[in-house]
Structures are given as C-alpha cells and as structure tokens.
Image (tube, rainbow, N blue to C red):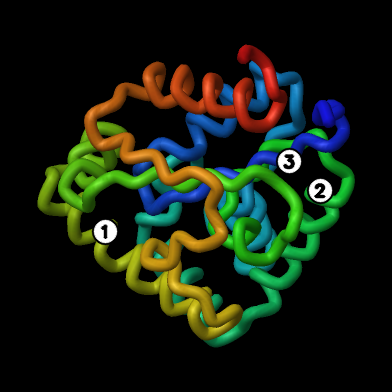
Amino acid sequence: MRTTRRDIVICLAGLTACGKSTAARLLANKYNLKYVSGGTTLKELAQKAAGAEKAGKGWWETSHGMRFLQQRLRDSSFDRQVDNQLLRYAEEGNVVLDSWTMPWLSEKGFKIWLEVSPQERAKRLAQRDGVSVQEAAEMIRKKDGKTKQIYRKLYDFRLGEDYSPFDVVLDSELLTSEEVFDTLSLIIDRLVLKRGR
C-alpha cells in the first residue's frame, strides 16, 4: 500500500555535529514537511525558564548550555515537556523530527541514525564554532556524556550505543552534507514513499 503524505514521520538522530539538523531541515524542505527540533525546543525552554542568553548554533557547548545539561540531570521536567510536544507532532504526521528521543519513544516514523566518529565530529564542530579541534573534542566529550546520562536515567536507553529502533544507520563520516541529503532522499523515496522500482 502506498504511503500517504499525512502518514509521513521521519525521525533523524545522531550525536553532536553529525549533521542531523542540516539533513533534517533539507529533507523537510524537499518533501514539504514540518521541521521540528527537540534540541531547539529544549534550548528555548532553558532560555525562557533560566534566563539564559539567546544564542544560535553552538549554544549547547557554552557554559550556559552545559549548566542546563546538569540541571536536566536533576530535573526531568524540561525533557518530558519537550518529548510530549514531539510525540504530538509525530501523531499529527507530516513532520521531520530532529530528536534524540523520538526513535525510542514514538512507535511512528521512519528512523534514521547518522553515524560519525568523535574525531570527525570534533573537526566539524571546530569549523562551525571557530574553536580548536582539541577544544571541540572536549566539548563533545562532555556534552555527549551528560546527554547519554540524562536519557539513560530518564528512559533507560543507550544513546549512540543501541541502534535497535532505527530503520537505517548511515555512516556519513566521509560524506558532505549534500551527499547525506542525496542518500537519505533516495532511501526515503524507495522505502518510505515507494517511488522507483
């Protein structure tokens, strides 16, 4: 049976600086789907509740972002609020969810994990945020460690270790953002929309 447009839910996940947000936005634009980012929603809640400064990319790696990660370890209400919002979007359909949790929490959706080594992610983060590769590697180590702790404590899943919820795991280590997008588009056309042979 052909998938109807309202049935489409795509979940993208991957660790810091793997390119998931870029890929998710491009896919949402191509398929005319809503784009929703769990990380952006969490950041907005942090800025509202804690009076943190507004910032764009790289906010999670700042001192404010790291303090918020620590706060989330003590208080799960932020995560639960965001995840409940994302689950509602999944129920409505017609959405690309840029989220670490939805592959585990939602029964709906085509779930994709982007796999990139810590070394390559550090290079990408360094370029994006204008820091040294060593600084970026340390930021990633701290952020990934805290984030894994949060989700292990809250939902008992192993982020970046358990791939069982995913329909596709794409090693995008050597791919440009355009190549990731092209590859995912082909996968979605064939496996989600059933285009082609």
Identify the disc placed on residue 45: none
| In the image, residue 72 above or below residue 193 | below
The span from disc 3 to disc 1 (Cα, nearest Å) is: 31 Å
The span from disc 2 to disc 1 (Cα, nearest Å) is: 31 Å
Quarter of the image with the N terminus is top right
Q: Amino acid at mark 3?
A: Val
Q: Nearer the viewer, mark 3 or mark 1?
A: 3
Q: Amino acid at mark 1?
A: Met
| In the image, residue 45 above or below residue 182 | below
Tag 2 secondary structure: helix
Residue ID for mark 2 = 89
- Asked if residue 67 shows in the view, the reply is no
Picture quadrant of residue 47: bottom right
Q: Amino acid at mark 2?
A: Tyr
Q: Nearer the viewer, mark 2 or mark 3?
A: 3
Find residue 82 and report its horizontal and vertical position in percent.
71, 62
Residue ID for mark 1 = 139
Residue ID for mark 3 = 9
Q: Earlier in the sequence, mark 2 or mark 3?
A: 3
Residue drawn at (81%, 34%) of the image:
94
Count of numbered circles on the image: 3
Question: Which of these two is toward me, 51 or 77?
Answer: 77
